[in-house]
Amino acid sequence: MSDSRSVEVAWRSHRPYLVNLAYQMLGDVGEAEDVAQEAFLRLSHPDTSQIDDVRAWLTVVAGRLCLDRMRSARARHEQPDESGALDITVSRDADPADRVTLDDEVRTALLEVLRRLSPGERVAFVLHDVFQMPFAEIAETVGRPVGSCRQLARRARAKFSGASPRQADVTEAEHQVVTERFITACANGDLQALAAVLDPTVWGVGTILGDFAPPPQINHGPDEVAKNLLRYLGHGATLVTGPVGEPVLLAFAQRRLFAVLVLTFRDNLVLKIEATVDPSVATRR
């Protein structure tokens, strides 16, 4: 894998997934991008040329890097900055005066979950419940026996739900795959791949924030919706999933949140996209 062309292919294929994975553990898009960068730097080393499964290898490396960062932060008694928490609940009858301005980098509701978990619990929960990684592979990342990893995930799940532990159902797992393809297509500016995950009758509505913002923009059909999405998300934006179990995507530019997208699924395709965008954030230096 030391060949530069192979690394480039892996970057396009797996970096969006890796950034999203790290974000679910760390809750900070800048740190998530740094973890992905470090993982790919290690991938380019000569002694990794015999890797059979690049994605699995990158996942393990990123998981360990996140674990190191979390342990280091805990040792320094650091807590996430929750001063700009964003309420991403969709209101059907929202008053325009109550719209949230996305001026400052914010944290999602996921941070409240992450704050309650130990580093080991966080890694085990995210890798297994969100990304469906087998516990045998998680054990390699965490450096604990398989049984211990199961217990870590169980404890994290109980803290998250506040109720009986449950496994993600098949529908959620399928939606996770569709969402990952959506994120990767946007990251690569791949119009065809993006249109492929959209329902034939898909429609999207975009609300632009600002003093002189236009009325909500509505688009219909895979081609029109995909083209409009890439206008905002296909030029260096970083897209990650929001709170665990919610069909929400967060878009960052220069590590600042500038858009929130709420997805509706039908038959494992995206049927509807509701987006709120502050374009001034994306252009800010």
Image (cartoon, rainbow, N blue to C red):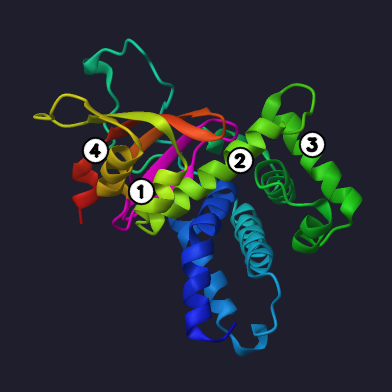
The label on residue 252 is 1
Q: Which mark is residue 114?
A: 2
* Left or right of residue 274, residue 168 in this image: right
Q: Which residue is mark 4?
A: 278
Q: Nearer the viewer, mark 3 or mark 4?
A: 4
Residue 107 in view (yes/no):
no
Left or right, 260 with respect to 18, comes to: left
Badge 1 crowding class, 10 Å Cα cut-off, few under 14, some 14 to 19, many 20 or more, is many
- The amino acid sitting under disc 2 is Leu
Residue under the image location 64 percent in, 33 percent down: 172
Circle 3 packing at 10 Å, graded few (<14), some (14-19), many (20+), is some
Q: Which residues are magenta?
A: 234-257
Residue at which label 3 appears: 155
> Amino acid under label 3?
Arg
The residue furthest front is 200
Q: Earlier in the sequence, mark 3 or mark 4?
A: 3
Percent from the top left, x then y, of residue 150? 84, 45
Residue in front for this viewpoint, 67 or 213: 213
| Residue at disc 3, secondary structure | helix
Residue at 44% from the left image edge and 39% from the top image edge: 249
Closer to the chain start, of discs 4 and 1, is: 1
Q: Is residue 65 above or below residue 243?
A: below
User: Could you say where residue 285 lies in the image, as x and y percent from the top left?
Assistant: 20, 57
Q: How far apart in space, not on screen, are marks 1 and 3 (Cα)?
A: 31 Å
Proximity of marks 4 and 1: CB atoms separated by less than 8 Å = no
Q: Earlier in the sequence, mark 1 or mark 3?
A: 3
State the SS at label 2: helix
Q: Secondary structure at mark 4?
A: loop
How packed is label 4: few (under 14 Cα within 10 Å), some, or many (20 or more)?
many
- First in sequence: mark 1 vs mark 2: 2
